[in-house]
Each structure stands twice: as C-alpha cells, then as structure tokens.
Image (tube, coloured by chain):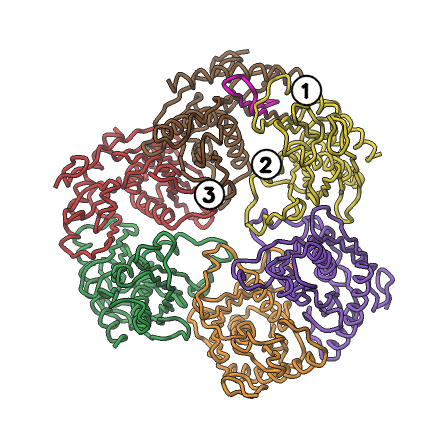
Chain colours: A yellow, B brown, C red, D green, E orange, F purple
Amino acid sequence: MARDDGRSPDQLRPVTITRNWLAHAEGSVLVEFGGTKVLCAASVQDSVPRWRRGSGLGWITAEYAMLPRATNTRSDRESVRGKIGGRTHEISRLIGRSLRACVDYKVLGENSIVLDCDVLQADGGTRTAAITGAYVALADAIAWMRKRKMCNGDPLVDSVAAVSVGIVGSTPLLDLCYTEDVAAETDMNVVMTGSGEFVEVQGTAEGVPFDRSTLDALLDLAGAGCAELTLRQREALS
Amino acid sequence: MARDDGRSPDQLRPVTITRNWLAHAEGSVLVEFGGTKVLCAASVQDSVPRWRRGSGLGWITAEYAMLPRATNTRSDRESVRGKIGGRTHEISRLIGRSLRACVDYKVLGENSIVLDCDVLQADGGTRTAAITGAYVALADAIAWMRKRKMCNGDPLVDSVAAVSVGIVGSTPLLDLCYTEDVAAETDMNVVMTGSGEFVEVQGTAEGVPFDRSTLDALLDLAGAGCAELTLRQREALS
Amino acid sequence: MARDDGRSPDQLRPVTITRNWLAHAEGSVLVEFGGTKVLCAASVQDSVPRWRRGSGLGWITAEYAMLPRATNTRSDRESVRGKIGGRTHEISRLIGRSLRACVDYKVLGENSIVLDCDVLQADGGTRTAAITGAYVALADAIAWMRKRKMCNGDPLVDSVAAVSVGIVGSTPLLDLCYTEDVAAETDMNVVMTGSGEFVEVQGTAEGVPFDRSTLDALLDLAGAGCAELTLRQREALS
Amino acid sequence: MARDDGRSPDQLRPVTITRNWLAHAEGSVLVEFGGTKVLCAASVQDSVPRWRRGSGLGWITAEYAMLPRATNTRSDRESVRGKIGGRTHEISRLIGRSLRACVDYKVLGENSIVLDCDVLQADGGTRTAAITGAYVALADAIAWMRKRKMCNGDPLVDSVAAVSVGIVGSTPLLDLCYTEDVAAETDMNVVMTGSGEFVEVQGTAEGVPFDRSTLDALLDLAGAGCAELTLRQREALS
Amino acid sequence: MARDDGRSPDQLRPVTITRNWLAHAEGSVLVEFGGTKVLCAASVQDSVPRWRRGSGLGWITAEYAMLPRATNTRSDRESVRGKIGGRTHEISRLIGRSLRACVDYKVLGENSIVLDCDVLQADGGTRTAAITGAYVALADAIAWMRKRKMCNGDPLVDSVAAVSVGIVGSTPLLDLCYTEDVAAETDMNVVMTGSGEFVEVQGTAEGVPFDRSTLDALLDLAGAGCAELTLRQREALS
Amino acid sequence: MARDDGRSPDQLRPVTITRNWLAHAEGSVLVEFGGTKVLCAASVQDSVPRWRRGSGLGWITAEYAMLPRATNTRSDRESVRGKIGGRTHEISRLIGRSLRACVDYKVLGENSIVLDCDVLQADGGTRTAAITGAYVALADAIAWMRKRKMCNGDPLVDSVAAVSVGIVGSTPLLDLCYTEDVAAETDMNVVMTGSGEFVEVQGTAEGVPFDRSTLDALLDLAGAGCAELTLRQREALS
C-alpha cells in the first residue's frame, strides 16, 4: 500500500531536531516530524514544588499547548476560554510522565525542570514529536546545570523517544500524519527508552476493537520507530 | 506471593453490580470492586450535541468525579477550585471512548446518553470499575429507550469491561487495590469487549521501564480478568 | 387532606440513618428522608483556617452538592460549569451555621471538621436531611477525636436537627416531598436543637405572603418534627 | 439600655430615600439607613430569560454587590477573584425573591426588570436597605413602563420593605448598625408587604439558640419597623 | 461650532470634586465631569506586594470598574461573567501608572495605596475623571498617613490630572461627552502633571488616521484643560 | 552615545519578515526585530460576530500572547492561570485597532480576519513587531480572499507599521531592545500608516514626566522608523 507521501508503512517522516532555537531557555529544540513542528523549551528552576521540599529530590513537569492556527481550522485559545481542555491536560501529563522515566531525582537534587511543548504547526503525532524533542531539550538543560554544578553527576539514566502507530485500511503504519490519523481504525502512542523498554503504551480502538496479533504488530513497528528516533536524538546531541 | 487480602495474583476482588440504585436515572448501577464503590447513572437525552445535529447519529459521553471523602485524605471539590483537574479529564475521556466502542450510532439515532460515574469510595481501580458498571447502566438505559421505540433495533454491538493489572515486587497482579497500586512498578488499565478484543490499552512505567515479556504477561492477566467481569455483567443483566 | 404518599399532615417520611457508610471518613452517614438520600461525611483536620490560627478555637464548615442525576432531569456539574451556583452556596452556608450552633470551639481545640453533604437522590428536603444526617456524622467524628485525645472533654453542647414545613392548599404540612415543595405557597426550613430551641428559621412566601398565624402554625409543626428527628438521631447513635 | 447612637431599642436609624439618583436607569434610588448607603438601579428589558419565553409572564431579578471600600477594611473585588462569594449569592437571591412577591407577572407581560443594588457604604443592614430602596426603584421603573404602555394595568400588587432585628445583651433591637450586628446573639432579617404580611423571615442564632418567645418579640419589633419603612416609601413616591 | 451643551470647543464641563464622600476610606472623592460621576476611594495598607518586600519602597495601584447601570444600556457585571474585560484592565493600568508618576516611593516607605475608581454614572471621559479625582483621594490618604507618621516627609512630588480631547467634524474639542466621543474621528487621553509635563499620551485614530498638526492641536487643547483641572484640584484640597 | 549592540540612536534592529511560515493559515509571517520573534497568523472566516451580522461589513480582531519561555524567566501560562492578564488584553486590543485602521469594511464584506500574534522570543518591542508583521500576514490573507472572489475589490486602503521609541539617559532612541526598554525614562509606541499619518500614539513616562520638546523628538524618530518599516513590508510583499 502506498502512503500519500510515498512512504513505506514502516518509514518515519523526515525528522529534524534543531537545538538552541531559543535564546533564553536552558534547553530548547524545534522538532519536526514532517509537517508537525513543536517548539520544546526546558526551564531550570532551583526549587521544587511545595509537596516535595526537603526531600532532596528533584521534579520534572511538562505543559503542552497548540497555537490557535497550528491546525487547518483556527481553534480558540484556552486562555481566552478560561480553562484547559481535556486533551491538553492528558497530553501534558503524558509528556511529564514520559520524561520523568529517564531521570534520577536524587542526582537531580532539589531542582525542577519544566518542559514547555508548544505546537506551532500540527500534522499528526504532535505528542510523540513533543516527547522526542523535549528529551533533547531536557538533555541540554541538564548539561547546562552540570556546568554550573547544580547536580552531582548525571541525572539522565536513559533517553526517551515516542512514536505513533496505527492500522489504516488493515495495514499497520508507522508515524501517522494527520490524514492517516483520522482514517485509522486503531491508534497507538508508544514511548520507549533508548535501551528499548516501554515507558508508556496507549492504544485506542477508533471504531473497531483490535485483537492481540494487531497489538503485537503495532508494538513491533513502534519499537523499530523509537529505535530510529533514539539515533536521531543521539546525532542531534553529539 | 500472598496479597494483603489473601487473593491469588490472578484473582479479582469481590465484584458487586447493583442495578437500579437510583430512582430517576434511565439506567443506574452501584458497582463495587472490593472497597471501590462507583455510582454509575445513565441519562438519556433525545438530542445530540450541536456539531452532530442532522447526522442521524447518536452520541455517548461520560463524566467521572470523586466525592471529596472517597479517599483516605479529603480532597478539595473541583467545583470549589473552579476547574477540573487533569486526572478527572483523562478518566472521563477514557470512559466515554470505551463505551462508544460498543454502540452503533446509527441504530441509536439522534439521541445522547451521558454516563455519570461518581466515586463514592476509592480503593484502587476506580476507572475500571466505572467502565464495567457504566456498561450495565448503559444497557439498562438502552433497554428503556427500546421500550419507548426511541431506536430501531439494538444499538449495543458488544459489551465492554475493564480491569487494572500491574507488576508489584516482580509479580504480575490482577485488579490492584490502592496499596498495591501505589507499590506497582508498572500499571496498566485494559478495556476489552465481551468478545475478547481490545478497546483500550494504557500501560505506564511507574519508576522502572518494562520489557515486552512483562507487557505480554500483563495483557494475559487482563484478558482473563475482563472475561470474568463480562460474565458478572451478564449475570447482573439477566 | 390526604397526601400523595398517604401520610397525615404532621407525619415525617420514613427516616433512615445509616452510620459508617464510608470506610475512610472519621464519621459518615447515609441519611434518607423518604426518597431523599444524602451521604454525609465528616473529615477531621488537626488545623484551622489561617484567620483562626493561634486562637485556641476550632472550626466547623460544610459543603453541599448534588450529583448530576440526583434529580429527575440531569443537571450540569458545577465543576464543569467552573463555578458554584447560588443555591449550593446558600445551602452549604446554612448547614455550616447550623452545626456550629452545637459545638463548643474551645473544647474542640484548634481542629477543624468539614461536613460534606452530597445528595445522591433528591425528593425534597435535601438541606434538612443533610443537617440531620451531618449531625450524626459529626458526633461520630467527635467520638473518634475523643478516643485519640484530640479534645479536652466533649465539644458537643447539644444536638441539631432540621425539617421543612409548608402550606399546600391552605394546609400546613410537615416534611415536604418534591411535588409538595413545588406546590407550596409558603415554604419554611427550621433548624432546632435537641433541647427545642431555634438555630435557624427560614420562611419564604412562594407567591402569596403569609400572616403571623400561619407562621405560628408552621413553627408548631416544625417543632414537633424536629423533636421526632432528634429521637431518631439518638437511636442511631446509641 | 442606651444604644451607641442614642436610639431607643425600637427606633429606626434616619432613613433617606433619594429618587432618580442616576440619569440613565428607568428607576434609581440612593437609600440610606444611617451610615449604610445603597444605590438601587432598576433596568427594564423588553424580553425575558429563555426558559420563560412564550409564557406571557414577566420576570424580576436582583444583583447585590459591595464596592471594595464600602467597609472599614478594603475587600477584594469579586470580578478580580473571578467568582461571586456565597454571601453575595445569598443576598442577591433574597432581594430577587422579595421583590417578586409584590409583582403580578401576567400584568407585567413578557418584560424583565433587573434590580442592581450596589452598596457604596456599609454600616449593617445592607440587605434590608437594599430591599427597601429597590422597591421604590422598581415602582419608578414600572411607572416608566406604564407611561410607554408596556404593561396592561399595574403589575404592583403591594409594596415590600425589610428590616433587621436582633438580640444584643438580652435586649431586642430594631435596625442593627454594624457594631450591634457583630455583638448580636440572634440576628433576623424580615421582609414584609405594605399590608403587613410576611414575605421572608430569616432568623439565625449567632452563638446561642433562641426560644419561641424571643422569636415572637423579634417578629413584633420587625413588624413595627417594616410598617414605618412602608410609610417612608409612600412619602418618597408621592 | 456650537456643542450640544453650548460649550465652546476649549471649555471643560462643570467639574465638581467632593472630598470625604465615604466614611471608612483614608481618602475618598466623588468627582463629576458633567454627567460623569466617579467614586474614588484610597485605601492605605501598611505592607507592599510580595515582590517589593524588603525594598524600603512603597506601591500604588488602581482598580477601575463601572456599575452595571452607569451606562444607557445595562451591562453584565464582570464578577458574574467571572472575568475582567480588556477595557477594564487597560484603564485600571492607566490610572495606576498615572498616579505612580507623582509619588516618591522611598518617602512613602513600605506602604501601599489602592485607588478604587468606580463609575457610578458614565457620560464620556470616565478614565480622565477617575485620574483627576483619584489624585485628590490620594493626597488625602497621604495626609492621613503623615498625621500618623507613616512616612518621612511628603511622598507627593507633583499633582496629576487628565482630560480627553478629540476631533469631531474637523474641530478639536476639549473634554468630550459620550455623544461627542462616539462621533470623534480621533480620540486622545492626556495625563499631565501640575507642572505641565506629560505623564501619558494616548491618541487613537477612530476611522481616519491623523497628521502631526492635528496631534499638535490636540496636545495644546489638552495642556490648557489639564492646567485648569490642576487648579480645581488645588481649590478642592485647600 | 553608543548602544549595546552598536546601533546609532535612530537605527532599527535587523528586521526580517518571513512570509508563509505556516502551512495552514491564509496568511502567516515570522517577523523578527533583532532578538524579538513573533509568529503572526491571519485566519479568514466567512462570517462576522453576532453584533455585526446583516450589516454588510467585515471585521478584524487580534490576539496577542507570549510563549512561557519567550522571556528570560519562565512565566506561567494564562491558560493555566485561567485568565488573561491586563498587559495581554491591552496589547491584543492595540493590534486589532491598528490593523482595522487600514481596512475598508464594506469592501471586505461580511468576512472576519483574526490575527494571532504569538511571541516566540521576546527582546523588547514585541507589540510593534507584532503589528508590523501582522500587516503583512493580513495582506496575504486578503490576497487569498481576492483570489477566491470573497471581496469586491481591495479592502486594504493603506499599510500599517509600528515602532517603539524612548528616552534612555536623555537620548531619544529608536526601536528599543529589552535592556533599553527597562532603562527608558519615557517609552512610546507609535503606529503609523504607509502614507505617514498616525494611527496610535501611546507615550508613557516611566519615572520622569516628559515635556513637549521630548515628545516632538520622539515623534520625529518614530516617523522615520515607521517609514523604513513600511519599505521592508513592501519589499517582503513584492
């Protein structure tokens, strides 16, 4: 089956990871998965939330948002509506959990890092691009901290990358673009470490429930995709 | 390994499904998974949201909430805080998606059903209990509609049940209670149809990433658990 | 005049007070006045609001809410609307004031008790049922505190119960159910101590203003009703 | 017992009712009960809320608020806090209910009148001053409507006035100022029609529950006070 | 060109500045520019916002609001809508900046003054009337502080007044009333010190852009108007 | 006086206007004034706000926002805080007014254009860069509409550009960067048409009031700056 953009089913879109896109942030990355562009900024703070003070442990959080015209049709700003939508909440939490999986809080010390992932342009896979880019911004922010001796040793215990997979017209596809995402019967986001283990698996039947062999095929595809993204992250950081 | 309450690793807690717990709702269920008690109310409306009008298709949504003292420590009301938290949003969306998987919108016609799942008491697995109970409330609401000829035929194409599984001290456990949930290295919620296919798989590494064989063991456990819950739903409805 | 459910004008609906309905709360009661079911949870905190710190005095507050499908037609959640309605505010404040009338703050010490009154099912008189049930939950919470020596002596100086009365078709009726409440020309909620004094009297003309003799008749009826509810509370607590 | 300002226990503070204080409103009154100053504006709208359309009936609502420096200590604006407090909600509802008691909705036709009662300066009794002044603003707004033939006949079936009464140091006092209100053991707000019947009775024990004879004494005092306020309203309107 | 109210183009409306309009505030003024009436209250607090603590410097802020029926058509309360509108925000900030221009923070010491400017009736120029009146309330509040030795010397380094100017039908006009404001092609608000220098110049083309000579003519007119308002402030304060 | 970046007092920073930065928007520009980067997206809608329907006239609005890490220190998201700040409101309104000055609503027809100006990186002058870039995005959106015959003729009657000027250490400077902005005694934002007339003049004394000759010097500087920006806009659009 030929995909609209000519990719093979197990092929990623062109991935670009541009470091230091912003002048002020301790780490910042513009990550592109094809037409999806996410600006990831890592902000270091030498304190932790109140509930964690005195523990000697650090903290990582993330906030995800979309610019109003990132999408084909303009959507209202959540600041104007006065509240954050369910989807935004859900993705912010996913990004935070994913990045926390590769950090040793003790080594980080009582410092926090906030990852702001703002989607400038959306074409499917914004959350997986955000996680993949945010890891690189996080690594840069941690390097910045280490230069200033803010932590004892390296708090990064592994790397983290993410990709979407799905079944479109019975075919398992890697890294869905927007039109594929809309057409998918099943949609899965997989977050994995650089050493190939799972951090998060979120599979959803859109319309048709799926069986175990479909699940297995999607996990295989995602494993290969995350491994490739891990390489891209390493190249970008070297 | 013995569990605190003496269960074997692959054993559900006592499950109770009490139908018609409320006088006014078209369908209502008090579902209990051990100490977890969720009141599920299905409300029928003979209209659909604005964006769906004129389509001839119905709609299903869900709202999840916890009473302030459902938990060991009292938590503030979201109505008092003036906004809904990320966790609430995430679970409400999960319940809605799960139940939509077993409904044929065309047969439902331009009617909506809202599933309110209010946790009266929490002891782990509130979202999976909510899905399992909400399905029964939904079935009762649909029976109520069919008596009134609001839909042509049966819009229910399958049943839906859900269970949590996790790794505690290297052992895969079914249907985690609160203390097990807190101790789990990996935590997974699985939603399945009565015919044994997946509707939603959400696995999260809490602390330690997990490998494929762990994932497989958890899916096996969840499959057996959902099959048993499906039987309980059938018993309750018969 | 015969009432719909066959009661005499001065007769309460069947009253049930089930203690320890919840596992976690220091005191909890499911109170039923006929079809009205309110879950009352008392939560003890070993601190007081900021404005009261250092005074040596305790504090009691209450929060009232209704589940969306407690009523015949589903109502939106206040958490979803992002604000608390006027009726909810008014009733929460009434419950708090009523219970504070039977507590000696000095003996309570710098501790707080929050009474959460959540209406699971509504059939008129939800606020009076809430007060009557919350008193029992409060008594249980105070007993819990005394076992742990959190207060010097008994902070409860009296008991508190409440009932609604109204004029329907010129007849004064005790403990109105929903259909009577809607039909009432005058509606009064009366909160009294176990020793027969008034804590709160709130009478409202719905449509037709009322004269002093009507007011007197309603107060007589309420006095008898509260006395009977006081007995039920004592039975439940013994 | 001498009161701070030399009044006898059954004496009102100086009452001033200044009509047409505002240029734009259809009815407007600056009402003063001693140091309490409330600006009441009646706004006529030739429509009714959605739920009342097509009924042929009118509607009356009220909104109460306090300027931040009406009181001795500045309080934050509710617009800045982003929500309306419980006390504001409660008083707005009371004013609305009270004024609705003297209006015939059928004669009013499908028109609405909003009564805005803004406390410019507070010295106790702001809600009773607001009701007393709002009635006069309402009467002026209705006269304005009748000139324009917006209603068939006079929708005003009676007048409405309100006063506070309370027990201070065992003595029943009429029209409490702020320092008396703070010192009161029992506090009651009474709304009555010009013909001497009750519209609303709200009595609250502040600290000490009260008996029936105290309640009777307070109602007597309030009856005389409302009768006098009714005279002042008539003088102002003639 | 004759103006509707017979004024010459360079003539202010009748200006009234009534001091001590409120009993509780440390400074308070009812300022009237023709039909525009603004109540300005200055509240002294012996503390500063968190970000300024320990600096030895004081702070001045302002909040502007309109009563719902200040205008010809009733507008909703911002407290009811749950948020402050853009116009309110903008004017509050302008008033605060303007008054800060005449205060020496060091002499003020770590004290704050909040200026509440509430428009009771609006007929154009509410923000300029608010600034002009707020200055007088501020001067009274500072005199109150100096009596209590809260500051070392006089923190007021100058006075501040404001006026609106605009082009209506090609003629530059001083102090626009509402109908003139609506008809203006260009609208400018100018804030000046008593010594004749500019604090704020805000000119806006409404429809037609304006050239430099128009700007110059408007600034001349505003300069004369502010000088006259400065005299009125001095008279009021003497 | 040498400026930090070596510019002469009347020199703009390097200005870059990149068109079509986004794939979906009808017009989009990344505008850079030195280190200030603003993404401007123009969204066309074939409808107008409710209050303008049936008038035959179009409408233009703007929304301004800053990404949390656009600045040196991370700031909280307005969506998370649940409300829009005063500064954001003020700038959004300024951008909207400025762009409306160059559009003929009749020719635009009943269509709307929303200009979203999101600051990706801030180094002073974000609002003037936003206006300058938004004009180009607007021009592109209008070209897009004209291709689709959505308007009769060209609704653009002129162009609009903006620049900041200020007094730093007694010297009037053009196009202040952030450190200059902080140090400025007087700060002015000037919006002008391509034909050299004023759309908006906003001058603020920061600390020291300014005299007429200072104002004149700043206006001269701004005039030259806007003329140069107009040239850059023309180059970008050709």
The stretch in magenta equals B183-201
Residue A217's disc is: 1
Discs 1 and 2 share one subunit: yes
Residue in the image at 77% along x and 60% along y: F177
Chain for numbered disc 3: C
Residue A90's disc is: 2
Q: Cβ–Cβ below 8 Å for labels 1 and 3?
A: no
Q: Left or right: where does residue B225 sit relative to residue C195?
A: right
The alpha-carbon separation of the residues under discs 1 and 2 comes to: 25 Å
N-terminal of the pair, mark 1 or mark 2, is: 2
Q: Residue furthest left?
A: C1
Type of amino acid under label 2: Glu
Q: Left or right: where does residue A124 sit relative to residue D1?
A: right
**10 Å neighbourhood of mark 3: few (<14), some, or many (≥20)?**
some
Discs 3 and 2 share one subunit: no
Q: Count the marks.
A: 3
Type of amino acid under label 1: Ala
Provide the residue designation for mark 3: C79
